[in-house]
Amino acid sequence: MNEPVITVGQSRSGTSLLIKIFINHGFVTGQERARGLYENHESLAVHGVVHTPNPDPAVIREAFFSSIPKGSRGVLKSMINKHDLYLRAFPDALWIFSIRDAEAVCESLWRKGRTHLHPKSMMGHAVARNKEIIEAAGDSTIVQMSRLMVGDYSSLERAMSERGLVMDADAVRSAINPKLWTCQ
């Protein structure tokens, strides 16, 4: 069974964009749901299990693999607060960690109506989440989402290469819409 690639970040950090990039590289998510300006490619089967009380990692794993065609390469996203759960469900997965500037994350959460708090009051939380991502990544390359959005694909290319994957710049370019990034 091909273990999935799992993107890890905090909310509004670009994990959905990374999923779209992997879809453009031929990966699948299972049954998808869409919302917002960027399609939020996420496995409905996994989402339904992860957001139940006391989710079972074995059930998450089964939900994902039963939702994708046999032999397909799968991709999932995990927020950093669910990383341990996904690590138990997919111990041999290929992990891609992403960071977005904490201030940009806070502004995006506020503009999208995901919080009533002013962005400055959320900075400590966003900075702490980025530190968690860096710790979870260990020695792995972290994808710098702000650099990716301006056409510097080097951190994504390194992260993929570390996992035995080959990045296709055209597949990345076709996933990125810079206008959507700035309004989110």
Image (cartoon, rainbow, N blue to C red):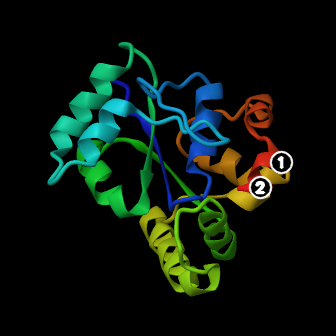
**SS under mark 2:** helix
Q: Residue at x 17, y 36 (%)?
A: 59
* Residue 38 horizontal/vertical position (percent): 65, 40
User: Local crowd at mark 1 within 10 Å, few (<14), some, or many (≥20)?
Assistant: few
Disc 1/disc 2 C-alpha distance (Å): 7 Å
Is 135 placed left or right of 58 in the picture?
right
**The one of 54 and 75 positioned closer to us in this rendering:** 54
* Residue 172 horizontal/vertical position (percent): 74, 36
Rendered position, 76 above or below 68: below
Q: Residue at x 67, y 76 (%)?
A: 103
Q: Residue at x 41, y 34 (%)?
A: 4
Image quadrant containing the C terminus:
bottom right
Q: Which residue is mark 2?
A: 183
**The one of 35 and 149 positioned closer to us in this rendering:** 35
* Residue 13 horizontal/vertical position (percent): 60, 59
Q: Amino acid at mark 1?
A: Lys
Q: Amino acid at mark 2?
A: Cys
Give the residue at the far top of this rendering: 70
Determine contact: label 1, label 2, CB under 8 Å: yes
Residue 56 visible within the image: yes
**SS under mark 1:** helix
Q: Which residue is mark 1?
A: 179
* Residue 79 horizontal/vertical position (percent): 43, 56
Image quadrant containing the N terminus:
top left
User: Local crowd at mark 2 within 10 Å, few (<14), some, or many (≥20)?
Assistant: few
